[in-house]
Amino acid sequence: MRYAIISDIHSNLEALQSVLQQIELERIDKIFCLGDIVGYGPHPSECLALVQQHCEIIITGNHDFACIESAELYYFNQYAKTAIEWTVRQLSDQELLFLKNLPLDGKRDDIYLVHSNVIEPRSWDYILSIDDAIDNFPSFTEKICFIGHSHHPEIFLQNSAGNHSRYNYKLDPKIKIEHDNRYIINIGSVGQPRDGNPDAAFGILDLEHQVYELKRVRYNIKKTFQDMTAAGLPQFLADRLFMGR
Ligand code: ZN
């Protein structure tokens, strides 16, 4: 079984299409989506349709949630808020209902899926440090927990002795899934990477070979930039795509 895990697409159709093309080449059995399908970018409906068409499991992210729960916008910065208000105007009642019915988490095999954190998914708190990971490991029983949310790829490990560490994916994007270890893996963002690399990010878990790999895919950033400008979305959100910050 080979799973592709995607997250934080943020209405970036160019990035999503490029990732789906790469997934096609990777002989993937199932795709899971960890939320934030919409927000920030110019093509919410198109991205929603593609995710519905391709993904086996889809869970909600804070931007998806904010589309149907306006009180959530209190926690958003001005750029993100403006983009959500624009997004809601683009979506049909049926699309909003679809977002409303998305679950907060998901499970498959020995894998747990959640957008932000395990302890309280609705808090949208981040897992950024080893200390955050240590706090979250006891809250799930599966071997691997996949997350998104920070747009920053990360791998946290817990070994059989209960020791924790952070894996440097920049040295090697592939990691062997060891029998006695447990993992919290942030797969990065399809549509708005923030780790200094502007290429779209997603993850592949190969259960047969027990390997996880972080993938990066080039996409037409200029096209997304132009579509965002044409839609009147905040310039800052369009500019940052080129920097991957
Ligand atoms: Zn996001």
Image (cartoon, rainbow, N blue to C red):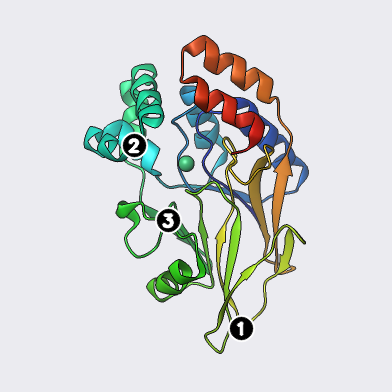
| Farthest residue, direction top | 230
Can you give x and y, in whole percent of width and height, for residue 204 in the image? 67, 54
**Residue 42 visible at all:** no
Which residue is under mark 3? 126
Q: Could you tell me how far apart the alpha carbons at marks 1 and 3 are, in whole angstroms?
A: 25 Å
Looking at this view, is 171 or 84 the one in front? Answer: 171
Q: Amino acid at mark 2?
A: Phe
Report the disc number at residue 180: 1
Q: Amino acid at mark 3?
A: Tyr
Total numbered labels placed on residues in the image: 3
User: Is 60 placed left or right of 70 in the picture?
Assistant: right
Note whether 60 is above or below 71 in the view shown. Answer: below
Looking at this view, is 97 or 73 the one in front? Answer: 73
Q: Residues within 10 Å of mark 3 (few under 14, many from 20)?
A: some
Image-quadrant location for residue 167: bottom right
User: Is 140 placed left or right of 197 in the picture?
Assistant: left
Note whether 242 is above or below 23 in the view shown. Answer: above
Tell me which numbered mark, 1 or 3, is placed earlier along the sequence: 3
Secondary-structure class at tag 2: loop
| Farthest residue, direction left | 71
Q: Amino acid at mark 1?
A: Asp
